Image (cartoon, rainbow, N blue to C red):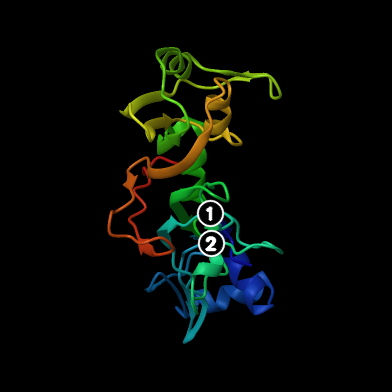
């Protein structure tokens, strides 16, 4: 049990296998420390990353982790896969069993991935209410046209889901072959960019994500490498 929200007496009762009544003397004797401070309050709220100790025994000391990765092509954005190498497999010798992905990239797509063990941070990154914009560099078979730019801005209907995509920015980077454009999305539906260009029969040859909200992929972060990042989570986010 690594409770995200638990009363201290319930937390100790579970981890020590004792009754909540038996927890009271431990608190009264000052033997319990929460985040390195002695406490006698049974209703202290214990979070996922709260450090809890009784005497010299540590009951919980989980540390939050926030990472960015430059995902290479040919790697699955998943923690487990029976057939293919995953982004977790790119970690060598590290204990990363509690990490999960805050968003995904297709098998052959490259670029910025964010990983964490903090569900609050990953929910913020994926919740449409947060307005997190993801930015992509796209290589195309054919040039970008004005009707494409206008359709991206107004939204494109996906009949299978019966929905219209949110407005997206499409900007030309190279009007000569290879044809390159930047796309900024405020959502992340299944194969969304490929499907949006597919409406104009323009094939996406390569897709590279270079930014997610406040995080930009450093030019010196090689494919497969990771780097710690600051969470930058708004204090009001639940």
Can you say whether 145 is above or below 191 in the image? above
Q: Earlier in the sequence, mark 1 or mark 2?
A: 2
**Depth order, front residue of 114/153:** 153
Q: Could you say where residue 237 lies in the image, as x and y percent from the top left?
A: 43, 41
For the point 60% across and 67% down, the residue is 11
Choose mark 1 or mark 2, whichever is in front. Answer: 2
For the point 33% across and 55% down, the residue is 230
State which quadrant residue 4 falls in: bottom right
- The number of callouts visible is 2
Residue bearing the label numbered 1: 101
Mark 2: secondary structure: loop
Q: Is residue 192 left or right of residue 237?
A: right
**Depth order, front residue of 225/141:** 141
Can you say whether 202 is above or below 40 in the image? above
Residue bearing the label numbered 2: 87
**Depth order, front residue of 8/176:** 176
Whether residue 238 is visible to the viewer of this picture, yes or no, is no
């Amino acid at each position: 049990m690594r409770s995200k929200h638990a009363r201290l007496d319930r937390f100790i009762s579970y981890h020590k296998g004792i009754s909540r009544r038996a927890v009271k003397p431990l608190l009264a004797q000052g033997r319990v420390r929460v985040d390195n401070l002695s406490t006698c309050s049974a209703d202290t709220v214990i979070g996922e990353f709260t450090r809890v100790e009784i005497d010299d025994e540590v009951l919980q000391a989980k540390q939050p982790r926030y990472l960015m990765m430059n995902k290479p092509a040919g790697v699955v954005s998943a923690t487990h896969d029976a057939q293919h190498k995953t982004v977790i497999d790119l970690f060598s010798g590290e204990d990363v069993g509690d990490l999960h992905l805050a968003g995904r990239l297709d098998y052959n797509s490259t670029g910025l991935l964010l990983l964490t063990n903090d569900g609050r941070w990953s929910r913020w990154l994926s919740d449409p209410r947060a307005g997190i914009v993801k930015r992509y560099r796209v290589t195309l078979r054919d040039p970008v046209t004005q009707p494409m730019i206008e359709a991206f801005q107004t939204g494109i209907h996906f009949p299978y889901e019966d929905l219209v995509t949110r407005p997206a920015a499409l900007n030309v980077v190279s009007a000569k072959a290879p044809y390159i454009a930047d796309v900024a999305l405020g959502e992340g539906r299944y194969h969304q960019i490929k499907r949006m260009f597919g409406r104009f029969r323009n094939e996406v040859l390569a897709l590279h994500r270079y930014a997610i909200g406040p995080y930009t992929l450093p030019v010196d972060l090689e494919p497969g490498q990771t780097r710690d990042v600051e969470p930058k989570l708004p204090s009001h986010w639940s």
